[in-house]
Structure formats: structure tokens, C-alpha cells
Amino acid sequence: MRKIVERFDTAAIYITHDLAVVAQMADRIKVLRYGEDVEESETRKMLNDPKHPYTKSLWSVRALQKTVRESKDLMLEIQSVNAS
């Protein structure tokens, strides 16, 4: 997507809650909450020093580690299934 934007010298709007994804594609970020503008800045500046608590909460999600299921207990068992 970024290559298309650069090639055609245009702009793109990404609507997402995932700032980590936007950071890879956008030069600037505008954060809205309930339709209200809460913060706008160059991508690198915002992600290095987010000002608004909502922006901080969106960016902090990247630090959450996904838990890996270590148990070997049966999660799902399906019996008597036919495909036709």
C-alpha cells in the first residue's frame, strides 16, 4: 500500500485500532476516540511520546504477550461427523 501511495503521490487513510500496523504505513497519525480528535502527530514522534491517555493505551497493547497454551489437555473432541 505504501508503494502505491508513493508511486501516485497521493494519500491513504487507514482506520484501525492497531497503531503498530499503522506505524509501518503512515507518516502521520490522527487518533480519534468516540469521533473526537484526541491527538495528531508525525508517526515516529507520536509513538515515541504519546500524549493522550487513549493513545498510550492503544500503543501499550503491542507489549502484551500472547499466551501459549502449554497444556496437552484435550480442547475439542468431535465424533460421528460425516461429510456429504
Image: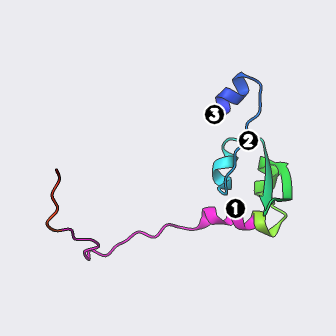
Residue positioned 16% across, 50% down in the render: 84
- Kind of residue at disc 1: Trp
Which residue is disc 2 drawn over? 13
Q: Earlier in the sequence, mark 3 or mark 1?
A: 3
> In the image, is residue 63 above or below residue 41?
below
- Kind of residue at disc 2: Ile
Residue positioned 26% across, 77% down in the render: 73
Is residue 78 left or right of 1 when viewed as pictured? left
Alpha-carbon span between mark 1 and mark 2? 19 Å
**Magenta region, residue range:** 56-78
Q: Residues within 10 Å of mark 2 (few under 14, many from 20)?
A: few
Label 3 sits on a secondary structure element that is: loop
In the image, residue 25 lies in the stretch drawn in magenta: no
Q: Earlier in the sequence, mark 3 or mark 2?
A: 3
Q: Nearer the viewer, residue 42 or 33?
A: 33
In the image, residue 66 lies in the stretch drawn in magenta: yes
Alpha-carbon span between mark 3 and mark 1? 22 Å
Camera-near label (1 vs 2) is 2
Label 2 sits on a secondary structure element that is: loop
Which residue is disc 3 drawn over? 1
Q: Residues within 10 Å of mark 3 (few under 14, many from 20)?
A: few
Which residue is disc 1 drawn over? 59
> In the image, is residue 54 above or below residue 27?
below
- Kind of residue at disc 3: Met
Camera-near label (3 vs 2) is 2
> In the image, is residue 29 above or below residue 82?
above
Tell me which corner region of the image, top left, top right, bottom left or bottom right, holds residue 35. Answer: bottom right
* Residue 25 position within the rendered picture, expressed as x and y whole percent measured from the top left: 68, 41
* Residue 75 position within the rendered picture, expressed as x and y whole percent measured from the top left: 29, 73
Q: Earlier in the sequence, mark 1 or mark 2?
A: 2
- In the image, farthest residue toward the front: 84
Is residue 59 left or right of 39 when viewed as pictured? left
